[in-house]
């Protein structure tokens, strides 16, 4: 009888420990792998013409996560790598990816028209959006998002190169800047962060 009571007591303790450990695991707040902005900052609205002559307006994307990336079509390495990783992250999210808009804004308006840039980004994902505009329009947007951009002379066949901020800016469903991803962040890590944001 005593042996049976002891077994029941041990079983109860083990179950209690498992419940406690499980609660602790699930109670832990999610740790973002990108750079969380908390509290989030209002994302300045902007409007730019798209390749099909319609207007893309950031404020009209509320309800979705908007991933903004600033780059250019002559970029030899950073831009194609980032776009490839963003495409992989979207693919990993499956159906949830329909709630995400990936937008690349040029830092090289002299060579990148909206048509050229949109064709470029669609090589990576047919739903990606490429935007360009006048230097004056773009300088305001670059400034609002703290984007660094500087032309550099080069002996390459591409002509000049452009040094630029390589982060991805994540605007949440309320139109606020919530998160940034550094260059080289793993696609799986980006997908995990985005999945968590979509659940909030």
Image (cartoon, rainbow, N blue to C red):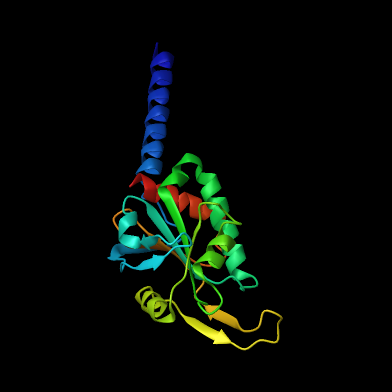
Relative to the observer, which residue lies in front, 198 or 67?
67
Q: Quadrant of residue 25?
A: top left
Tally the marks: 0
Using the image, determine if residue 55 lies above or below residue 195. below
Relative to the observer, which residue lies in front, 45 or 194?
45
Q: Quadrant of residue 85?
A: bottom right
Which residue is at the far top?
A: 1
Residue at x-position 36% and y-position 78%: 140
Quadrant, the N terminus: top left
Residue at x-position 70% and y-position 82%: 156
Q: Is residue 33 visible?
A: no
Q: Quadrant of residue 162?
A: bottom right
Residue 125 x/y as whole percent: 56, 53
Relative to the observer, which residue lies in front, 74 or 29?
74
Using the image, determine if residue 149 lies above or below residue 55. below
In the displayed structure image, the side of residue 68 where residue 37 appears, left or right: left
Residue 199 x/y as whole percent: 36, 44
In the displayed structure image, the side of residue 83 where residue 28 appears, left or right: left
Which residue is at the far front?
A: 53
Residue 180 x/y as whole percent: 43, 64
Residue 74 x/y as whole percent: 62, 73
Relative to the observer, which residue lies in front, 25 or 183?
183
Residue at x-position 38% and y-position 23%: 9
Q: Is residue 128 visible?
A: yes
Residue at x-position 42% and y-position 56%: 32
């Amino acid at each position: 009888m005593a042996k049976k009571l002891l077994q029941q007591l041990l079983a109860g303790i083990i179950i209690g420990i498992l419940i406690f450990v499980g609660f602790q695991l699930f109670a832990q707040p999610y740790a973002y792998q990108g750079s969380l902005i908390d509290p989030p900052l209002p994302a300045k609205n902007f409007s730019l013409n798209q390749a099909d002559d319609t207007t893309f307006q950031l404020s009209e994307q509320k309800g979705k996560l908007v991933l903004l990336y600033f780059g250019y079509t002559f970029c030899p390495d950073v831009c194609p790598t980032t776009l490839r990783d963003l495409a992989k992250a979207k693919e990993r999210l499956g159906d949830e990816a329909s709630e995400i808009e990936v937008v690349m804004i040029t830092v090289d308006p002299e060579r990148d028209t909206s048509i050229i840039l949109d064709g470029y980004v669609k090589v990576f994902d047919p739903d990606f959006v490429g935007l360009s505009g006048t230097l004056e329009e773009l300088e305001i947007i670059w400034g609002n998002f703290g984007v660094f951009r500087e032309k550099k002379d080069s002996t390459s066949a591409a002509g000049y190169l452009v040094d630029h901020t390589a982060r991805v800016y994540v605007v949440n469903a309320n139109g606020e800047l919530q998160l940034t991803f550094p260059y080289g962040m793993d696609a799986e890590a980006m997908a995990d962060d985005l999945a968590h944001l979509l659940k909030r």
